[in-house]
Image (tube, grey):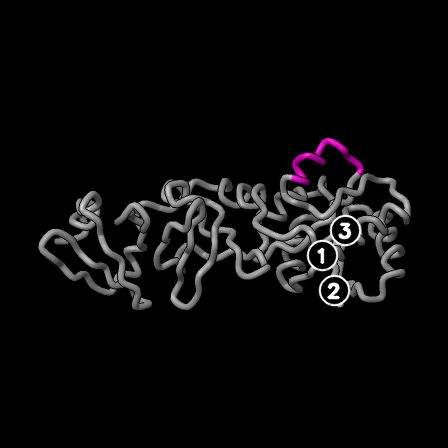
Amino acid sequence: MKKVIIVDDEQSGRTLIKGYLKAYPQMILMGEANNGVDAIKIINEFKPDLVFLDIQMPGLTGFEVIGNLEEIPEIIFSTAYDKYAMQAFEVHAVDYLLKPYTKDRFAKAIEKFQSNEHNGILPLASEIIMEKEKYPDRILVQSGRKLVTIATEEIQRVEADGDYSRMVTEKHQFLSNYGISKLEDKLDPSTFIRVHRSSIINIKKVSSLERYSSSYDVKMNNGDVVRVSRGYMDNIKKLIY
């Protein structure tokens, strides 16, 4: 069974999708919304597998809805405007249904969803969230096959992982498609400081410091130990009174 949400400001658009969905008993309609604000609430509540999402709506656009979700479901855009198609596929949408569309065209979109060929970090979705404010309070990350947002205040430390970064909380680890230098720019410097070429720490999550002859080890609240490299010693010294 797959949970489905329909978001469209026009009743006719929602009715069309509901009618086409009757051919797919495995698709369970959990609810619908006619504006962006309500869409965020219902998607965050039900955590659907698939959302049929309009783009131009009262309050918030479909892309702005994506930027406020706790988890990013599979998205099939359903819209009367073709100008957003490129942006939609940058978000790795399953499909882009241009109104008016036929039952056969709808079936092709469902087939793409069921083929499950569209997994992975959504680059534009990440950008939408990261660029909402200079130091965002939530960041989009990957957890298994799901995309979730986590509060930056929960992050204990960040470590480089090739071209990506791994965010470590008290109990979990999450993958970000941003490199560590990009994250350094987006995380609030009053809370997050670079202590190594491969490490950033949340100073509010530091348990203790252990000093050596030429360096420090930082022990985090979750028990992790992070070595401070010589080139970043000044960042740590600023915290010592």
Q: Residue 50 carries which label?
A: 1
Q: Closer to the N terminus: mark 1 or mark 2?
A: 2
Could you tell me the amino acid type at mark 3? Lys
In the image, 141: left or right of 63?
left
Q: Judge whether residue 59 can be spotted in this image.
A: no
Q: Residue 99 carries which label?
A: none
Could you tell me the amino acid type at mark 2? Lys
Decide: marks 1, 2 in contact (CB < 8 A)? yes
Decide: marks 1, 3 in contact (CB < 8 A)? no
In the image, 134: left or right of 122?
left
Looking at the rendered structure, the secondary structure element under dot 3 is helix
Residue sticking out furthest to the top: 83
Q: Closer to the N terminus: mark 3 or mark 2?
A: 2
Q: Where is residue 128 in the image (x, y as percent from the top left)?
A: 55, 42
Decide: marks 3, 2 in contact (CB < 8 A)? no
Residue sticking out furthest to the front: 162
Q: Where is residue 199 in the image (x, y as percent from the top left)?
A: 32, 51
- Tell me which residue sits at (47%, 50%) in the image: 176
Whole-number angstrom distance, CA of label 3 to CA of label 2: 14 Å
Q: Closer to the N terminus: mark 1 or mark 3?
A: 1
Could you tell me the amino acid type at mark 1? Leu
Looking at the rendered structure, the secondary structure element under dot 2 is strand
25, above or below 142, in the image: below
| Residue tagged 2 | 2
Depth order, front residue of 184/66: 184
Residue sticking out furthest to the left: 213
- Tell me which residue sits at (61%, 44%) in the image: 64
| Residue tagged 3 | 112
Prevailing secondary structure class for the magenta stretch in the rendered image: helix
Count of marks, rendered view: 3
Q: Give the range drawn in magenta.
A: 80-89
